[in-house]
Amino acid sequence: MKSEPISKPSQVKTPAPAAVHLQTIGPEEAGQRLDNYLLRWAKGVPKSHVYRIIRSGEVRVNKKRAEPTTRLIEGDVVRVPPVRIAEPAQMAAVNSAQTKSRAQGYSDKMPILFEDEALLIVNKPPGLAVHGGSGIALGVIETLRITRPELKFLELVHRLDRDTSGVLLLAKKRSALVELHRQIREGQTDKRYYLLAHGEIAQGAGVMQLKYALHKYLLPNGERRVRVDPDGLPSHTALRVVKTMKRGDAAITLAEAQLKTGRTHQIRVHLLKLGHAILGDDKYGFADQDKIVKSKRLYLHAHLAGFTHPRTGEKMRIESPLPAEFTAMMKNFEAPAEKS
């Protein structure tokens, strides 16, 4: 009887000690605040620790102490003390076959609406968060970084709620990101959404101007909510009724909402305040009415984004067609003639 060979115990490699990092700022990093740069670079490091090492002087810019608000310039050398970053573990997860397969599946459901050397604009499906976190491993940004590894820089220009579909802008150059953020701050962009709301929204001639102060708060379980509150921040949505549809005693309205401000859950809360919650809204909607019409998603779709191209200066108008779920829902109702 042959004895089984005794396998040698595997050698456990001791991880190399963390070392000081010297980072030279390139054109894509230039213009950032020091704290924002470090928070992106040192992924997985607690924010409090990042600010501590800056204020203690352990982080240096060109061998000098710096403040969190210091703006970095191309060619600056940033000294970062030894910190344990989560990048190796994250990269191992990212590179796993299962994660890549999931990312590819998400990417296949996210058509590209426009792309050039500065921008990547996609049609985000409902149910996909724009970024990971809070138990979500993969969002749009993680998905695209995995499936498009050749893109050395990729950042979200703006956000959409997880259950909202439609036009989503990403920047492939930091200069493009900075310029588009400026346009958003100064109200030079045009963002429009289609929505289906419960009931028949009565509208006279012209566009309804919904202006309410909104206050953000947290539920006991940590979920974020927004309510109309006189002490909140001002918000403004322009609402245009496209058509109303009736089926027996039930009615729904197709409307276009144009954002004049960009508060969290703004359109959803404005429609609730109006008394016509959006179909399928599990946070601000009418659950009993959703059951009657058999809503299967949030019927809110970012269908148009207008802006000036950050490099060419060309006026851009990117559109996404009305989703099939909207068309199917409307076909279940009798549709009268469109309102002018």
Image: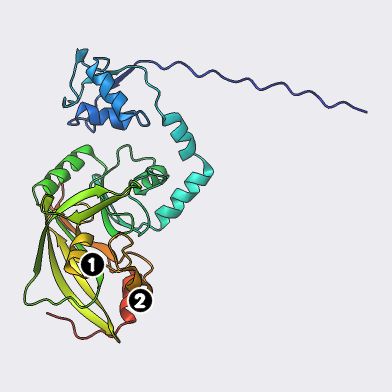
Q: Quadrant of residue 319?
A: bottom left
Q: Label 1 is placed on what type of residue?
A: Tyr
Q: Residue at x 37, y 21 (%)?
A: 83
Task: Note whether 60 is above or below 28 in the view shown.
Answer: above
Q: Residue at x 33, y 62 (%)?
A: 282
> Does residue 68 show up?
yes
* Residue placed furthest toward the top: 63
Query: Mark 1 or mark 2: which comes first in sequence?
Result: 1
Q: Which of 115/216 is in front?
A: 216
Task: Note whether 245 is above or below 128 in the view shown.
Answer: below
Q: Position of residue 254 (x, y in %)?
A: 23, 74
Q: Are marks 1 and 2 in contact (CB under 8 Å)?
A: no
Q: Quadrant of residue 156?
A: top left
Residue 340 horizontal side relative to residue 29, left or right: left
Q: Residue at x 72, y 21 (%)?
A: 8
Q: Which of 51/176 is in front?
A: 51
Q: Which of 226/189 is in front?
A: 226
Task: Note whether 130 is above or below 305 in the view shown.
Answer: above
For label 2, count other residues whose C-alpha is less than 10 Å away and answer few (under 14), some (14-19) or many (20+). Answer: some
Residue 238 horizontal side relative to residue 250, left or right: left
Instruction: Quarter of the image for the N terminus: give it.
Output: top right
Q: Residue at x 16, y 49 (%)?
A: 309
Q: Label 2 is placed on what type of residue?
A: Val
Label number found at residue 293: 2
Q: CA distance from mark 1 to mark 2?
A: 18 Å
Q: Position of residue 55 (x, y in %)?
A: 22, 19
Q: Nearer the viewer, mark 1 or mark 2?
A: 2
Instruction: Quarter of the image for the C terminus: give it.
Output: bottom left
Mark 1 = which residue?
A: 194
- Label 2 residue SS: helix
* Residue placed furthest toward the front: 220
